[in-house]
Amino acid sequence: MPARCGALLLAACVGLPGPAFAQQALPDAAHLQADARRPLSWRSLSEDEQAVFDLGYRVFNTEWVPANSPAGRIDGLGPLFNAQRCDACHTSRHRGRGPAGDGELPADLVVQLGRMGADGTLVRGTYVYGYVLNTAAVHGYQPEGRATVLYTTQVRTLADGSKVELREPRYGVDDLSGAPLASSTVLMPRIPPGVQGVGLLELVATEELERIAAEERKSGAGVHGRIAWVGEEGQRVPGRFGWQATEPSVASQVSIAFAREMGLSNPLVAAADCGADRRCLEAPSGGSPEVEPALFKALVFFERLHAVPAERPVQDSDAGARLFAAAGCADCHRDTLHAHAPGRAALPIHPYTDLLVHEMGEGLADRDLSGKPAREAWRTAPLWGLNVAYASGQPVRLLHDGRARSVEEAILWHDAEARSSRERFSALDAAQRRALVAWIESL
């Protein structure tokens, strides 16, 4: 497995400031992204900072090429990969779109790999294929395999007699380049989330997350989110990013995407995700590391400072917000958190998440190749920025694998800790459901 330089050593690795990157005074309110075409920062930038931000935007849209190509600083792709540029999956810096229907998975639905431990918990990564099934390869190399999905349908009947059809996916892999996968191998399909606002989430204090977790345990609402603690350079820190809060920082999230999905070594991950593939391990390198520190620094800075899109006004938004709270959605999708920087006043932000992980039921669980569900918890997905996805005119796919084709479908997949909220939503009449959904789509 690739060696990692921990994000807490980021300053030593690449000259980047650590999580306290917002050393300037925080604004009274985070700047919002009014124009979806060109990225803006959530705070004012100096001339030098703007240059780094703009460079990061170019790196985000850079199409990387194989090692030894006459492309200077952007070679080293693969040899095994899923996409050649960040924007191929994070479409226009927003969420991925996922599959339209049955068949081979698109590049923006990446299948992570793991195995079921003896106690039923998930162990990430496999010996032969590493952490991610790489479905593309540079010339002269073979992709690790092909991932597919087959949907079956189930119909949910709501209290007023309305029927909603849900798609239940079953994933498979074939055309493997190496040994067969064991039946205990867990397939973890993941659609990429948007990158807007992630730097603000990185600035939410651990103490605030601990307070929220304690409040949820005491609420009696059946919601008991917990911090997804992860190890980082010998310290225990909250996981914040990824569908299951597996990464503690923007830098660590960027580093594993470069290494595992693009085959690019970088200042935090020293090798691509080759698994046991000897030819991959011995492939020519585009440099050491392949993503130069200056380019890595710029991309992390860009993602940390990327502003959140402004909410879109909708008719009778107050009614939608009230229904959202009354259904219990706000128990986990909290409207307000606070970004902190040393010595600065807290900055209220409105991501509609608690950054905690929750049990969501077997229906959403990843499964091994025998069909057995893994024991997992899911981070409350931030809802801010959804309006941009709906304004794009493209199909919107929700939940971790894009199975939900609408907000209504996504809600109806909620279970376990979220079951009572799902049932309250199902009990609403059609007009109330439309108002609630329209409000969520405006965020």
Image (cartoon, grey):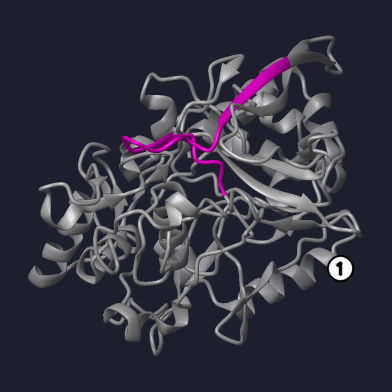
SS category of the residue bearing label 1: helix
**Closest to the observer: 426 or 93?**
93
Report the side of 369 relative to 244 (left or right): right
Place of residue 64 in the rendered image (x, y in percent of width and height, measured from the top left): 25, 45
**Closest to the observer: 401 or 24?**
401
Report the side of 263 relative to 368 (left or right): left
Decide: is 338 above or below 179. Answer: below
- Please tell me which residue is depicted at 78% across the width and 10% down the height of the picture: 163
Task: Determine the image quadrant of residue 20.
Answer: bottom left
Decide: is 418 above or below 332. Answer: above
**Closest to the observer: 274 or 435?**
274
Report the side of 324 relative to 117 (left or right): left
What residue would you read off at disc 1? 218
**Residue 138 painted magenta:** yes
Place of residue 4 in the rendered image (x, y in percent of width and height, measured from the top left): 48, 72
Task: Determine the image quadrant of residue 404.
Answer: top right
Label 1 neighbourhood size at 10 Å, few (<14), some (14-19), many (20+)?
few
Q: How many marks?
A: 1
Q: Main secondary structure of the magenta part?
A: loop
Place of residue 328 in the rendered image (x, y in percent of width and height, measured from the top left): 76, 45
Looking at this rendering, what residue extends furthest in the bottom direction?
A: 343
Do we see residue 313 in this rendering? no
**Closest to the observer: 421 or 389?**
389
* Magenta residue span: 132-151
Do we see residue 57 in this rendering? yes
- Please tell me which residue is depicted at 22% across the width and 45% down the height of the picture: 62
- Please tell me which residue is depicted at 65% across the width and 51% down the height of the picture: 380
Residue type pointed to by label 1? Lys
Place of residue 258 in the rendered image (x, y in percent of width and height, measured from the top left): 39, 55
- Please tell me which residue is depicted at 26% across the width and 81% down the height of the picture: 15
**Residue 112 painted magenta:** no
